[in-house]
Image (cartoon, rainbow, N blue to C red):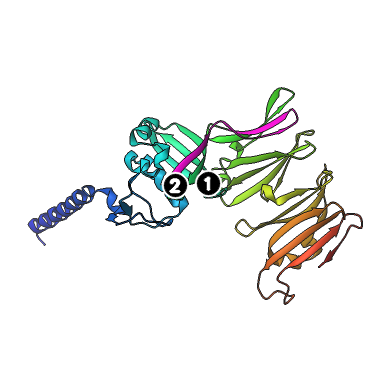
């Protein structure tokens, strides 16, 4: 192949690349959400109105509530304020001008860690980054209406998850890309715990503290720390300053009314961490472990625990056996009862 032929081939290749770039950049990105006419207002969560308040068109895209909220923040991040405003109920009076003023410095806004409260109401976090690189974090509570449109209920910044016991107050506070647990005692505020120390560990990337609560005697604060692929129950002893860590969720702990014992129950297939132990307080000495008592109980992937104050007994209710061909045919559920007085257990 001569020099002339090589030059012609190279020039042709460059022309094709430039033509492709020109055609791609000239396409309106809204093709992703192609509008099609309809004769009546659609119903069901599978449809999103593209304009408000008279949705004469719909987006030919199937979404659920979480995807709808994500779409709203995607529109904000791309400064499609008219499209973002169209996702709100008309009664909210959210216009493109309102959003353009409110988010004049927006770079990106990324929602995460959704939890459904009730009646299509969701609580989630938004990591906000301005066009100049400044970072902030918000906790949003948002509701999806029967018309499949958004209503904003609450935006929280700074202090959140406040809890009280007498004159004691505890809360979570977000700053400088991490959050911390605080306690106000006798008018003095002290930092008890924070997520900064975990920033270098992949397991705790984006870790958050949440849901601090006092025990009924005010001795302990128990709260959650969760990150990628893992969740941890933490218990702070107000008298000693000690922090105990357990692989569980906050909802996995049950305290006896006199706060002399606690049971922690959790099964976590994803993180591989299980917990099914009874502890004496305040030293958290293990007095009974279900799977140590009988390794077979580990085959049950669902566990719920409770305490009967009259009989002084803890109840472990097990279900969802795995593998399905368990050594005890026909026992899809098992109840194990531990008696504090006799320090023995039985199966029902």
Q: Which residue shows up at 77% across the image and 64% down it? A: 335
Q: Which residue shows up at 87% across the image and 53% down it? A: 310
- Rendered-image quadrant of the C terminus: bottom right
Direction from residue 287 to residue 230 in the image, left or right = left
Q: Which residues are magenta?
A: 148-173
Give the Cα separation between the discs numbered 2 and 1: 9 Å
Q: How many marks?
A: 2
Direction from residue 46 to residue 218 in the image, left or right = right
Q: Which residue shows up at 73% across the image and 49% down it? A: 253
Magenta stretch: includes residue 6: no
What is the chief secondary structure element of the magenta stretch?
strand
From this viewpoint, is residue 79 visible?
no
Identify residue for label 2.
69
Identify residue for label 1.
122
Q: Which residue shows up at 74% across the image and 62% down it? A: 317
- Which of the 4 image quadrants contains residue 220? top right
x and y percent of residue 12 in the render? 13, 55
Direction from residue 331 to residue 31 in the image, left or right = left
Direction from residue 264 to residue 101 in the image, left or right = left
x and y percent of residue 305 in the render? 75, 56
With respect to residue 127, does 289 lie above or below? below
- Rendered-image quadrant of the N terminus: bottom left
Q: Residue furthest front?
A: 40
Question: Are the residues tagged 2 and 1 within 8 Å (C-beta)?
Answer: yes
> For numbered disc 2, what is the local secondary structure?
helix
């Amino acid at each position: 192949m001569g020099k002339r032929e090589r030059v012609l081939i190279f020039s042709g290749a460059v022309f094709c690349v430039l033509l492709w770039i020109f055609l791609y950049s000239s396409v309106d990105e809204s093709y992703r959400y192609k509008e099609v006419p309809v004769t009546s207002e659609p119903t069901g969560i599978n449809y999103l109105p593209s304009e408000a308040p008279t949705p004469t068109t719909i987006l030919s895209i199937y979404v659920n509530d979480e995807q709808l909220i994500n779409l709203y923040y995607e529109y904000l991040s791309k400064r499609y304020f008219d499209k973002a405003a169209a996702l709100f109920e008309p009664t909210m009076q959210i216009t493109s001008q309102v959003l353009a003023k409110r988010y004049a410095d927006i770079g990106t806004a990324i929602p995460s860690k959704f939890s459904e409260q009730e009646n299509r109401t969701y609580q989630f976090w938004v990591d906000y980054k301005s066009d100049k690189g400044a970072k902030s974090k918000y906790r949003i509570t948002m509701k999806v209406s029967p018309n499949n449109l958004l209503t904003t209920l609450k935006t929280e910044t700074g202090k959140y998850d406040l809890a009280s016991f007498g004159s004691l107050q505890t809360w979570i506070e977000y700053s400088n890309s991490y959050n911390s647990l605080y306690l106000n005692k006798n008018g003095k505020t002290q930092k008890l715990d924070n997520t900064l120390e975990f920033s270098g560990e992949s397991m705790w990337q984006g870790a958050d503290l949440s849901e601090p609560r006092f025990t009924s005697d005010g001795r302990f604060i128990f709260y959650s720390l969760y990150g990628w692929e893992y969740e941890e129950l933490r218990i702070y002893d107000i008298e000693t300053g000690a922090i105990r860590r357990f692989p569980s969720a906050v909802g996995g702990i049950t305290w006896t009314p006199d706060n002399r014992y606690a049971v922690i129950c959790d099964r976590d297939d994803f993180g591989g961490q299980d917990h099914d132990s009874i502890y004496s307080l305040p030293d958290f000495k293990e007095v009974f472990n279900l799977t140590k008592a009988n390794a077979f109980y580990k085959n049950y992937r669902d566990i719920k625990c409770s305490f009967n104050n009259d009989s002084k007994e803890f109840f472990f209710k097990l279900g969802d056996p795995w593998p399905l061909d368990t050594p005890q045919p026909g026992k899809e559920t098992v109840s194990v009862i531990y008696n504090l007085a006799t320090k023995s257990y039985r199966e029902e």
